[in-house]
Image (tube, grey):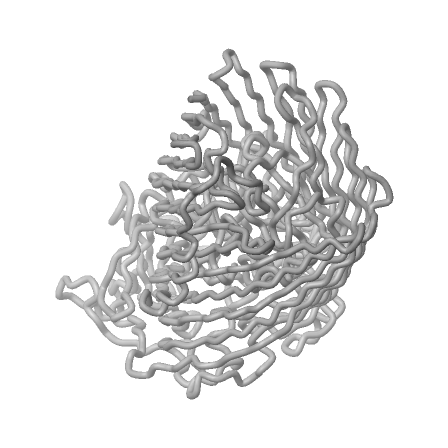
Amino acid sequence: MFARYLLLSVAPIALGIPAHAASAASSDAEAPAEVVRGIEGQAGAGAGGKPAAPQSFSTGVAKARDALDSATSTSTLIDSEIAKVGARSLGEVFRYIPGMRAESIGGEGGANISIRGLPIALGGAKFLQLQENGLPVLEFGDVAFGSADAFLRADLNLAGVQAIRGGSASTFASNSPGGIVNLIDKTGTTDGGAIELTSGLDYDTYRADFSYGGRLGEHTRFQMGGFYRQGEGPRPTGFQGYKGGQFKFNLTREFSGGYVRVYGKYLDDRTPVTSASPALVSGTNDKPEYQNVQGFDFGKDQLLSRYIPVNLTLDRNNRPVTHRYADGTSAKMKSIGVEGQFEVDGWSITEKFRFSDMSGGVIQPYILPADALPFASLNRAAGILPLVGASGGSITFASGPQAGQVIASPAALNGNGLLALVTVQDTTVNSLDNVTNDIRASKTWGIGQDELTFTAGFYKSAQDISATWAWSTIVTDVLGGGNAHLINVTLPNGLPVTQNGVFAFGTPFIGNRRRNSYDLTYNVDAPYASVNFKTGRLSIGASVRYDMGSASGTLFGSDLLANPGASVVTLDIDGNGVILPAGPERRVATLPLSNPSPLDYSYRYLSYSTGINYRIASDLSVFARYSKGARANADRILYSNYVNPVSGALNVKGAAYDTVQQAEGGFKFRRADMGVFLTGFWAKTREHNIGLDRSYRAYGAELEANYRRGVFVINAGATWTKAEITADAIVPATVGNSPKHQADLIFQVIPQVELGKLTFGAAAYGTTGSHAQDNNLLKMPGYTIVNGFLQYRPTERIMVSLNANNLFDNAGIVEVAEGRIPASGLVTVRTVNPRTVSASVRFSL
């Protein structure tokens, strides 16, 4: 793979220009390095609590500008404010960006993220791009079991987060019509650093952060730092699920009119997955009541357990391999990049290049929804035994301190009498390696009192997606506290049906599907350009982008339409020389390696955006914008009728990408002590996905505001959305319904009091109710989550912090797998994290 990247490396090499001037000029690319907490450029707190000057915004736009001079909707969060909200993952941080819906349900990674009513069909961030220092972490934000947020961590090197919603995001990045969220690192502009130690007070976690930066000489500066952590995490699992960290560095050489920067990152981290948890539901679909199963608190517990340590399965070459449940969501990333800016004959040229070596995976227990099967895989023992062909049989503990003991009264097991047929979603992400290069040139001409700015650029990327799905089926009881057990099932004649709790080394209840493996490469080439004309208080701009993409590679798997079902064989998978007559080694699903399928297609699409901004006064402007962009579909359309399994071409040409049309308009008001930004929006999109061919429409309004008076500061946001499924080629009955999880109102508010050495406050976010699935039957209740924080500075260089995430321990439900109340009254749900309280001490260096 690396060989084909050599051509892309030519441009950054050309930027090795020696320093030759006394000081560096300010640059657009450097503008975000000193971000302050703001809303649409609203001034936050500067030194000593004084209002800071408004800052320009550079993400997803041609040129960094004051937000009141730009026809875009943007927000900025800085590191100090992120620390206050008590977020345990970046998905939780994103909840504080107005207009953004972030369901942080997969631990550190795997969050479902969308914006302004755009749909979340199968997870991830399809229409939204996550960036790091102006380049995408992954070309596609919704790679199955390899989401972009899994490879991002906030630490003391983070200067801030910039987010643009809609607008020119369609034309200044590929695959980002909904918007861009950009994490920006510190670059050593301030001498010094910090060491911070954090410990959970009511949960098991320990973390150490450090950062340091400054000048190495008159023209050179550096920044470095990282973190390491370990612990069980916010939910009891019985094992150390959090373990790992990252290290980042950058070195900047300044010269007259620009700079060159080299930077790198090493990430090796694992976090437990927040699995879907059993719950009782009663009442009606419209007014359901969710309750805990005895012995299992769905707001705190999950199916992970100290007594279920590993999953035995087959790798991509059909060889036995063991994966630990403690690996959860694992992410490894090694990246190196070069960034620079310089002036040539009045043109400002910016170059960004990065290569990333990425891999990881996800292993999690998953109970198939009652809606997906003709039977309940979460049921009383008497209901589970017939499903595994053991009517009238017996059950015993297969793991834990009671291993081998017969369960004489299954109906009384753990006080709930429940067993679960658990699908082990074991997916190894072999490679998400990617290389990206973005070069642009911009120039401004004075025309009398007016200004004309032109920008042109070229973006190129190559993204690998290689993964192996090796799912299994096990039997467990339902018990919280990280104490669940594997369960063995025996026929009435004494023959075992399971072995160490394993019923099948495959997925017989869904036709032995999900035994897949693929090695793919997606290439993107995209020229783009923009023009902006400013005359007096009026600015008019337009931009265009032309994406040319291709997909190639090889697929193997049980889900190929030309090869339905996996090859099920008898295999001594544990190598003990014994194959039980009715055991799981007679139900081993293998990859059909002799029946590959190619992938080979290309696509092209045009994106454009045009906007107008009028600055009525120094503190007030109005704007309007219309945009059309698209998002190319990657692995989410594999193993479907969209792709021809013989030729690798598309059966449905329109499935290569999904378009998004958007309109927005509003006003921006900003003074030193307050800011109010109101935007109305409309969006229309098409969605192709596995088992999905739909169109959607959404409209609504987005409010951001902040206010400062003396020691009191409050920042707030709210988004009202009406979204509708307007067409459905597969399930027409959903037309007219609201997309699943789409609430009418989401909101966030952060009030705080600054008293010299002491700062305290709260960070709250919430949502009104929504539907669990697109059939619009079963409702999920709304909720409000409050995080509290307190910071005390006994000396200038020491700060002690206390953070309480989910202070009132609200079990906010963010996902229900079922679309209606089943006859059993049992569903599976995912919730926000329970209350966790942590304490930190930071030493400034």
Quadrant where the N terminus sits is: bottom left
Q: Which image quadrant is residue 286 in?
A: bottom right
Is 13 located above or below residue 88 in the figure? Answer: below
Tell me: 344 left or right of 239. right
Tell me: 460 left or right of 180. left
Q: Percent position (x, y) of residue 399?
A: 28, 48
Between residues 107 and 212, which one lies in front from this camera angle? 212
Quadrant where the C terminus sits is: top left
Q: Residue furthest left?
A: 577
User: Residue at coordinates 49% horizontally, 29% vertically from top-left?
Assistant: 190
Q: Percent position (x, y) of residue 127?
A: 60, 61
Q: Is residue 681 visible?
A: no
Q: Is residue 323 visible?
A: yes
Q: Residue furthest bottom?
A: 646
Q: Percent position (x, y) of residue 366?
A: 45, 57
Q: Percent position (x, y) of residue 563?
A: 39, 83
Between residues 179 and 315, which one lies in front from this camera angle? 179
User: Residue at coordinates 43% horizontally, 65% vertically from top-left?
Assistant: 463
Between residues 355 and 317, which one lies in front from this camera angle? 355
Is 554 located above or below residue 327 in the figure? Answer: below
Labels in figure, total: 0
Tell me: 777 left or right of 493. right
Is 178 located above or below residue 232 in the figure? Answer: below
Q: Which image quadrant is residue 323 in?
A: bottom left
Between residues 592 and 398, which one lies in front from this camera angle? 592
Q: Residue furthest top?
A: 794
User: Residue at coordinates 67% horizontally, 53% vertically from top-left?
Assistant: 165
